[in-house]
Image (cartoon, rainbow, N blue to C red):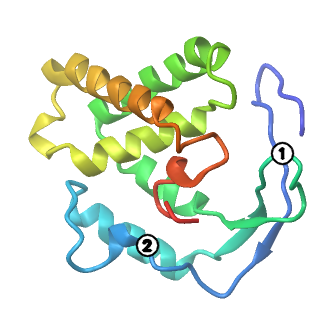
């Protein structure tokens, strides 16, 4: 890890290993019902064709160095670049709540979980609901979803419920 400064954030350096291609991503398959605009889905499909698929070390405690997972960083960046103002505001609010409030109470909760929660909201929320006057409602819905996920005994910070693009990873 590289320490941050007043002009640059901290940076986690990880080894990545090239793999041949991305596995099937349900969101991008024909027939998948989503509220993410088709133009954004097409951008994600193009990103899958042009970016280098890679795997990174990602394992539960005690399994370090023994497990790899496909990284979807390029797809995540593509989806984040497509956000409108209200979607970006929801992410900032969720990130703050996760990082500054909930992480102190829920072990293993990271800002990555806020991003995954945002992606689920994008998938589930009709485009006409992304309005300034609906932002409080959207935050409430997202927090309720997060609480339900945290209360679900099957999900821990090391299980697949926290991965949007590859939930079965």
Q: Position of residue 55 (x, y in %)?
A: 73, 70
Q: In this rendering, does residue 84 appear at all?
A: yes
Residue marked by disc 2: 25
| Left or right of residue 60, residue 120 in this image | left
* Residue under the point 31% across and 72% down: 42
* Pick the front one: 53 or 140: 140
Q: Secondary structure at mark 1?
A: loop
* Residue under the point 20% across and 54% down: 35
Q: Position of residue 129 (x, y in %)?
A: 13, 35
Q: Position of residue 46 (x, y in %)?
A: 42, 76
Contact flag, marks 1 and 2 (Cβ < 8 Å): no
Residue 108 to residue 14: above or below: above
| Total marks placed | 2
Query: The N terminus is located in which quarter?
Result: top right
For marks 1 and 2 on the same chain, the one whose residue lies earlier in the sequence: 2
| Left or right of residue 1, residue 60 in this image | left
Q: Depth-wise, is mark 1 or mark 2 nearer the camera? A: 1
Q: In this rendering, does residue 83 appear at all?
A: no
Residue marked by disc 1: 61
Cα–Cα span, label 1 and label 2: 27 Å
């Amino acid at each position: 890890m590289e320490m941050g400064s007043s002009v640059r954030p901290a940076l986690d350096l990880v080894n990545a290993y090239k793999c041949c291609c991305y596995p099937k991503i349900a969101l991008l398959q024909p027939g998948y019902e989503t509220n993410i605009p088709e133009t954004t889905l097409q951008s994600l499909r193009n990103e899958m064709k042009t970016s280098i698929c890679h795997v990174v070390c990602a394992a539960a405690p005690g399994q370090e160095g023994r497990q790899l997972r496909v990284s979807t960083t390029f797809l995540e960046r593509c989806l984040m670049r497509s956000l409108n103002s209200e979607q970006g505001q929801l992410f900032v609010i969720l990130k703050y709540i996760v990082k500054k409030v909930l992480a102190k109470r829920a072990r293993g909760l990271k800002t990555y979980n806020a991003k995954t929660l945002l992606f689920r909201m994008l998938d589930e929320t009709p485009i006409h609901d992304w309005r300034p006057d609906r932002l409080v409602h959207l935050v409430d819905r997202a927090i309720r979803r997060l609480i339900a996920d945290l209360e679900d005994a099957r999900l821990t910070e090391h299980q697949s419920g926290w991965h949007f693009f590859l939930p079965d990873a």
